[in-house]
Image (spheres, rainbow, N blue to C red):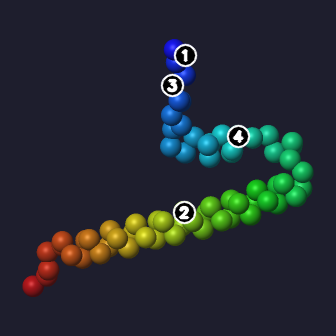
Amino acid sequence: NVEEPAEVRVVRGQRLIEACREELELFGVSELEERLDILASERARVEAQIDRKRSGRAAADALFSPRAG
């Protein structure tokens, strides 16, 4: 009975941190351009998520806040 090693749990955001530490000198121009495209898409995705969370929070605040006068 051979036990497989326990899978190492990746900390949230760890892959992003690792990607940010990569040596960029090793990449070609096209790879760097592709990386910028991916980062731009990721930024847009994150901004959209922030907007959704803020909208949800604003809706909850409006629903549960005491009404004036």
Q: Residue drawn at (53%, 29%), measured in percent from left and top?
A: 7
Q: Position of residue 66 (x, y in %)?
A: 14, 75
Q: Secondary structure at mark 3?
A: loop
The numbered mark, 3 or 4, whose residue comes first in the sequence reads: 3
Q: Position of residue 22 (x, y in %)?
A: 75, 41
Amino acid carrying label 3: it is: Ala
The numbered mark, 4 or 1, whose residue comes first in the sequence reads: 1
Mark 2–mark 4 Cα distance, whole angstroms, equals: 20 Å
Q: Say whether marks 3 and 4 touch (CB < 8 Å).
A: no
Q: Say whether marks 2 and 4 touch (CB < 8 Å).
A: no
Q: Say whether marks 3 and 2 touch (CB < 8 Å).
A: no
Mark 4–mark 1 Cα distance, whole angstroms, equals: 36 Å
Q: Say whether marks 4 and 1 touch (CB < 8 Å).
A: no
Front label number (1 vs 2) = 1
In the rendered view, tell whether residue 16 sits above or below residue 46: above
Front label number (3 vs 1) = 1
Q: Secondary structure at mark 4?
A: loop
Q: Position of residue 2 (x, y in %)?
A: 55, 16
Amino acid carrying label 4: it is: Arg
The residue identified by callout 3 is 6
Front label number (4 vs 1) = 1
The residue identified by callout 1 is 2
Left/right of residue 38 with respect to residue 23 in the rendered view: left
Q: Specify few, some or many for label 2: CA neighbours under 10 Å numbering under 14, 14-19, or 20 or more.
A: few
Q: Specify few, some or many for label 3: CA neighbours under 10 Å numbering under 14, 14-19, or 20 or more.
A: few
Q: To which quarter of the image does residue 37 belong?
A: bottom right
The residue identified by callout 2 is 46
